[in-house]
Image (cartoon, rainbow, N blue to C red):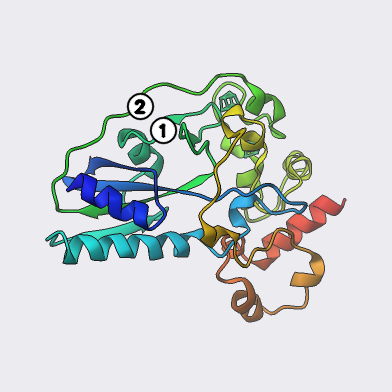
Amino acid sequence: MKRKLKAFAASLGITETGVTTYGGRTAFVCLFPYFAGKEEGNLSVYAYSRDYHAIIREKLAHICDFLLTDCGAAYAEGFADIGPAVDKSLAYCAGLGFYGRNTLMINPRLGSFFFIGYVLTDLPMESDKPLGGKCLGCGRCAEACPGKALDEGFHAERCASALTQKKGPLTEDEREIIRRSGCVFGCDICQLVCPHNSAPPQPMPEFLKDRICNLTHDMLKGLSNREFRDKFGGRAFAWRGKAVLLRNLDILEK
Ligand code: SF4
Ligand code: SF4
């Protein structure tokens, strides 16, 4: 069954898959590479395409259909980011990678520029084994981090990716971290410098379509909240709203 399911996923372009258990069910974990280079612009690479949650859910829906109609499952449900399990931990248990000092899951073939999705099902399958191992430990991510968020553990309150998504007023130190990251949403620095990402594979084609790599005041100002949602609601960078993005644009310009 596991081999059949992995072959079906591969036919959808999902080549890195693994099996573990979660909450008494089988978890079929899938990786979705998205990196095709960092463009000039102020968005993190993972936010370039249409919202990855939707892209992953569409792929996982095919796997759920396959389990329910071709494999005899009574239950199959797909999750992308928002779900009952911690996706990084599932990926680790399913043998899909190891943890980097930058807190990200690193896959030996894909590096770390991928999303994680999973399907829970009642069909029993043999679990894969964790890979073990860890990142090269070179420290480049910690050295390059604009907020020194990776010095002695991880300090989310100094991570630019978290700060660009934080609502409300920011301290001058927090604003300076965002400025140094160069991003109005997210931050790629600790991944870009990581040697595990020196030769990333081609992304899935869905992540190359309809991309936005840069935001400007002109694109946002004057839009009502409704117009903003209509125009950008299907984008990962839109989930914190227009005001946070405009604030971050102001920060980068000062
Ligand atoms: S995402 Fe950016 S700010 Fe956050 S840990 Fe990585 S390099 Fe540092
Ligand atoms: S940059 Fe070096 S220390 Fe940081 S996650 Fe990559 S290999 Fe590990």
Decide: is 70 above or below 161. Answer: below
User: Which residue corresponds to the image point at 71% horizontal and 48% vertical from the top-left?
Assistant: 170
Decide: is 50 above or below 18. Answer: below
Q: Do residues under tags 1 and 2 come within 8 Å of each other at their CB atoms?
A: yes
In the picture of the structure, the residue carrying the numbered disc 2 is 131
SS assignment at label 1: loop
Q: Residue furthest right?
A: 254
Measured from the top left, where is residue 141 in percent x and y? 64, 28
> Given the image, on which type of amino acid does mark 2 rest?
Leu
Q: Mark 2: few, some, or many residues within 10 Å (few <14, many ≥20)? A: some
User: Which residue corresponds to the image point at 38% horizontal and 58% vertical from the top-left?
Assistant: 12
Query: Is tag 1's residue or tag 2's residue first in the polypeptide sequence?
Result: 1
Measured from the top left, where is residue 228 in percent x and y? 65, 75
The answer to whether 206 appears left or right of 165 in the picture is left
In the picture of the structure, the residue carrying the numbered disc 1 is 97
Q: Quadrant of residue 67?
A: bottom left
